[in-house]
Amino acid sequence: MSENQSLKAQLEEIRLKLKKTETENKDLIDRWMLEKMNSAEKLNEVNAMYEDMMQQLKVSSIEQLARQQVDGIVRQREAGYVDHAESTVPSSCKHTIHAHEGGCGSILFQHNSDKLISGGQDRTVKIWDTKSGTLSSTLHGCLGSLLDLAITHDNRFIIAASSSNNLYVWETSSGRVRHTLTGHTDKVCAVDASKVSSRNLLSAAYDHTMKVWDLVKGYCTNTIIFQSNCNSLSYTMDGLTFCSGHVDGNLRIWDSRMGKVVGEVAAHSQAVTSIYVSQSGNLLLTSGRDNLHNLFDLRTLEICGTFRANGNRVASNWSRSCISPDEKCVTAGSSDGSIYIWSRLNNNMLSILEGHSSPVLSCAYGGPGNTLASADKNGNLCIWC
């Protein structure tokens, strides 16, 4: 009996050791799997960083080559000038499209394409063929009115700012929602994507914050709290800084990595409604509720042009104006339904386009022929030629 009890004790001891070993083995496997997941995530981050670095290197190389070619040959042109096909001043409406019920607040063109993207009060994003005036596709999934739109430089993702306090990211190819970006506590009124990377995104909301997002991971990497709400923002061409226009009438330049102000100027006596960076990256157009459209030299933050007209009235806090791709024209919509076009070089009025029956909220140039498009408060689009 004593031998039997001794054997039972030894057996129990062995069972305890086995159980302990199995537990240690399971913990080891779990730690190993976690380490593999962390390694994979770090590898993805390194690959994304490498892609961004190569893209920035490519952009800087192109800029350096352009400067070398420009220097001494066309010195009379502005440094950094990008030579575009000279655009003609639009004179007639080619297509009138009823795009959205309840109003259309934002439009933009796909890069190097004649496809126009519009967002409206009906919670949809629509893509239009400006040559034929027909609808190409409709993106669903947004739970609020669309206040602003952005598209990545490679046309891969379309991003919408919404009154539902969220941002929505769609894959352009499939039309599926890739991310719903949450974190703002009030309506998101402005959004912009980096001109050099498909990873970086900016947003501003009426909760006194601006956020920097990682589009690969789908989460916020930095939150900037500021006392004056931002109505419009835009990345500069290098992707290292961005500009913001605020309710207090000031234009601010930010370091996108540090989230700190590196430049500030009083742009308007009332709220800034629009920020637009020219394609050369040297000029910045702002519009304000004081019904002025000011052109700044981004290198010095000095005003190099002011555009106004007796009948031109900015329609809303988010009315968007623009500069033509050849940088010769400044274009802005008005609350009387007209579109005003000025010459940038001499501040003269070039044309007043009439085709809308309600306040014009947004204007945009795009496409191979530098087509002008406009959107109004009734949800109508006009394609001009």
Image (spheres, rainbow, N blue to C red):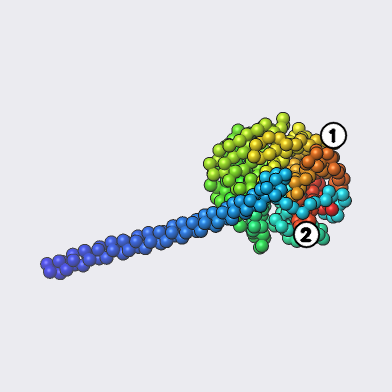
Q: Which amino acid does label 1 sit on?
A: Asn
Q: Quadrant of residue 32?
A: bottom left
At x 12% / y 67%, what residue is drawn?
2
Q: Would you place residue 97 above or below residue 315 in this image?
A: below
Residue 319 to residue 52: above or below = above
Crowdedness near tag 1: few (<14), some (14–19) or many (≥20) residues, C-alpha within 10 Å: few
**Tag shown at residue 74:** none
Q: Which residue is drawn at 25% across and 63% down?
A: 16
In the rendered image, residue 63, in percent from the top left (x then y), is placed at 62, 51
Report the residue that reaches farthest toward the top.
269
Marks 2 and 1, Cα distance to the nearest angstrom? 34 Å
Label 2: which residue?
129
Q: Which of 320 and 380 is in front in this view?
A: 320
Residue topped by disc 1: 310
Visible in this render: residue 188?
Answer: no
Identified at 82% across, 60% down, the residue is 132
Question: Which residue is nearer to you in this view: 284 or 328?
Answer: 328
As displayed, is residue 347 above or below residue 373?
Answer: above
Q: For the residue labelled by badge 1, is the local secondary structure a helix, a strand or a loop?
A: loop
Question: Residue 107 vs residue 56: left or right?
Answer: right
State which quarter of the image contains the N terminus. bottom left
Does any portion of residue 85 appear in the rendered image? yes
Tell me the element at label 2. Answer: strand
Q: Position of residue 271 (x, y in %)?
A: 70, 34
Q: Which of marks 2 and 1 is in front?
A: 1
The residue lying at 42 percent from left, 61 percent from top is 36
- The answer to which of marks 2 and 1 sits earlier in the sequence is 2
Q: In this view, does 213 lie to the left or right of 23?
A: right
Q: In this view, does 286 lie to the left or right of 12?
A: right
x%, y% of residue 28?
34, 61
